[in-house]
Amino acid sequence: MSDCSNQVCVNRRGVLGLVGLGMAAAVAAPGLGSTVAIAAPATALTSEQALEALKEGNRRFVAPPQLCSIDLAKQRASVAAHQAPWAIIIGCADSRSPPELLFGGLGVGQLFVARNAGNLVDPAVVGTVEFGVGVLGAPLIVVLGHQRCGAVAAACDVVAKSATFPGSIGPMIDPILPAAIAMRGKSGDFVDNTIRESARRGTTRLTTASPMLAEAVKSGKLKIVAAHYDLDRGNVEFLT
């Protein structure tokens, strides 16, 4: 591990400081019943502040990426009894896209992460996200696709070539097929277009599958965005 520049360290401490200063009083989890409450104060970062923190972290990762020597033991101790993550990331299981690193080397307790092949919004992910929002109080959800995603490429092969896959791979990628069908024949790269479309559809699926999340968005307490990670350049593009 190398020492990082003062600028990088200060920026990281600034984000940590925002999280620390943002601790609010414990509140009942909306939509989950009064018996389920936040066990410790949640972050008071707004969704826009959380989104800017992710963008700033990715800028650090890209130009130039450096690894700070951080006191992991101290961080672990500080969150062992409670957690107050300020962003939820639904990411792909791909080993090249670890959210904590590509958003600037974030420490333990900051991101609430759900990962599977293709960053799919399935029932388990919806329940995980509802916990992150309703119980832990996170104000931001990012559905993060990435360049050259194997699961999405497989779905595109099903649509374009009638490909089949062994075991549970076929059923796993079924939810990506509507995005692939919608992008078939469009200008640009078929797979990359589908990666972006699938991430966008994932954001919609969260609110259609969860009245609790839909209400949090409607009330302004929650923001849900899609994003695309470029494996070659390291940058995250937030999609509209």
Image (tube, rainbow, N blue to C red):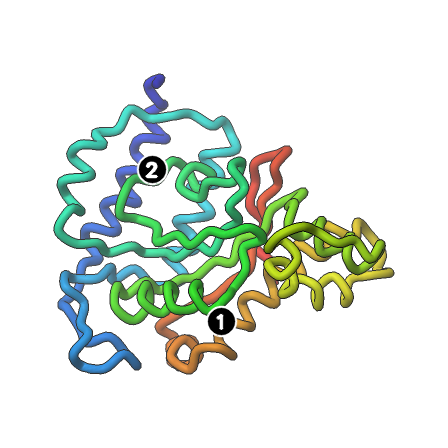
- Residue in front for this viewpoint, 174 or 212: 174
The residue sitting at 51% across, 62% down in the picture is 225
Check residue 206 in the rendering and tell me which mark sits there, or answer none.
1
Give the quadrant of residue 138. Answer: bottom left
> Is residue 21 depicted above or below 38 in this figure?
above
- Tell me how far mark 1 sits from mark 2, CA to CA: 31 Å
Q: Secondary structure at mark 1?
A: helix
Which residue is outermost to the top?
Answer: 2
Q: Secondary structure at mark 2?
A: helix
The three-letter amino acid code for the residue at tag 1 is: Leu
Quadrant where the C terminus lies? Answer: bottom right
Q: Name the side, left or right, on which 143 lies relative to 192.
A: left
Check residue 139 in the rendering and tell me which mark sits there, or answer none.
none
- Residue 197 position, x and y percent, is 67, 61
The residue sitting at 84% across, 54% down in the picture is 161
Q: How many marks?
A: 2
The disc, 1 or 2, on the residue closer to the chain's N-terminal end is: 2
- Residue 8 position, x and y percent, is 36, 31
The three-letter amino acid code for the residue at tag 2 is: Asn
Q: Nearer the viewer, mark 1 or mark 2?
A: 1
Q: Name the side, left or right, on which 143 lies relative to 69.
A: right
Q: Residues within 10 Å of mark 2 (few under 14, many from 20)?
A: some
- Residue 2 position, x and y percent, is 35, 17
Give the quadrant of residue 101. Answer: top left
Quadrant where the N terminus lies? Answer: top left
Q: Name the side, left or right, on which 129 lies relative to 93.
A: left
> Is residue 163 depicted above or below 182 in this figure?
above
- Residue in front for this viewpoint, 167 or 7: 167
CB within 8 Å, label 1 to label 2: no
Location of mark 2 (residue): 11
The residue sitting at 51% across, 30% down in the picture is 63
